[in-house]
Amino acid sequence: MKTFYKLTLLALIFNFQLGSAQQTPAAKQSQPIAITGATAHIGDGTIIENSILVFKDGKLTTVADSAMTKIDLSGMEVIDASGKHVYPGFIAPNSTLGLVEIDAVRATDDDSELGSWNPHIRSLIAYNAESKIVESMRPNGVLIGQITPRGGRISGTSSVVQFDAWNWEDAAIKVDDGIHMSWPNSFSRGRWWLGEDPAMKVNEDYDKQVTEIQSYFNASKAYENGDTKTINLPYAAVAGLFDGSKTLYIEVNDEKGITDAIHFANSENVKAMVIVGGYEAYKVADLLAKNNIPVLLNRVHSRPNAADDDYDLPFKLAKLLTDKGVMVALQADGQMERMNTRNLPFYAGTTVAYGLTKAQALQLITLNPAKILGIDKDYGSLEVGKSATLFISEGDALDMRTNILSRAFIDGRDLSLETHQTELWKRYSKKYSAKK
């Protein structure tokens, strides 16, 4: 009977969550729009203090200093953004947004598959465009994400989406952009809850686990070079890593693991790879720069992993790597990852306090991830010919006190910034203001 009541309660919670759908996706841009007077943060390090931006049919047609450019604004919707700031939409790589809605309800959890070798598993078809968590990203300027599977040695294939869509087909920006793999740990801790010694110890199976990865890649190459009449979906999916159509994302944090992962990718002729996590990447920054390998850094707002690490190491990792010429972008993987993704701009803001300029910090969540994900032709910066995926903020978007959006656009479509959370904020602000 207790089990029955628990299941009933979970069902009610689930139905309540689904009962209030997210905002209706915005309609296609119908007329040209001009934003005037704002400080435009281009995303490539350039800032235009008194700008004019014009976009038509979802594409930017003008990005200029308004004092140097005269444009006939008749027939346009003109947004006076004097004293405000305009930014390219922020990009969240390596995210499970839209794959899990309620952690405690198994039916809404679809971020991993059974088994260890799943390169053919496509996260895109599991993406829930009507997720209320996805919706809550937009008021902070996070408008694009790389939807990434989890679990196993090879988790599956990610895709890049925009966060205002009816379904996954509408959301897709870049389909099947990369394959995600977890590199074996060189060291491990004992499971204290089973009475094991919790101290760090060498992973005695490390070499065996690396050999398994090499064997899998060799088998996939043999399949591609042989008779493919009998289809093997996992092996076929890996082929994109060798012809350059997919990027290999390797999740690894320790110095030895990062070094071994780079040598592995080079020996297997993988055309493009990215380090995900990269906690000790600063120790091999020269090797990363030499091989032109970007890093998707772990969450900035975290504690050091080791007792002898600098207390502020997670905060200054972006600075250490950037100074060495490594391309860096920020991600939010970790505990409560999906909810914390909305804090992406504030992670970038923290790196400013630890050495980066604001222009460099902005690149960590705009142009750099766009380049890493291979979507920089259309997204990541405010440039003529690119998508009008941008937002207007009342102040500095990297500061949680002033990141207050008044308008946001994806491909020129005027988004609703209302969410379940903004509705609750209005409700309770009225309640407590009434008490005063």
Image (cartoon, rainbow, N blue to C red):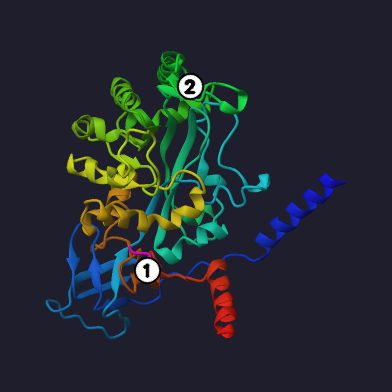
Q: Label 2 sits on what residue type?
A: Thr
Quadrant of the drawing holding the C terminus: bottom right
Marks 1 and 2 in Cβ contact (< 8 Å): no
Q: Is residue 282 magenta?
A: no
The range drawn in magenta is: 399-403
Q: Nearer the viewer, residue 94 or 163?
A: 94
Position of residue 174 measured from the top left corner of the image (x, y, whole percent): 40, 48
Q: Main secondary structure of the magenta part?
A: loop
Distance, label 1 to label 2, CA atoms, is: 57 Å
Name the residue tied to disc 2.
Answer: 228
Q: Is residue 46 visible?
A: yes
- Report whether 240 appears left or right of 435: left
Q: Is residue 115 visible?
A: no
- Which secondary structure, mark 2? loop
46 w.r.t. 303: above or below: below
Q: Which mark is residue 436?
A: none
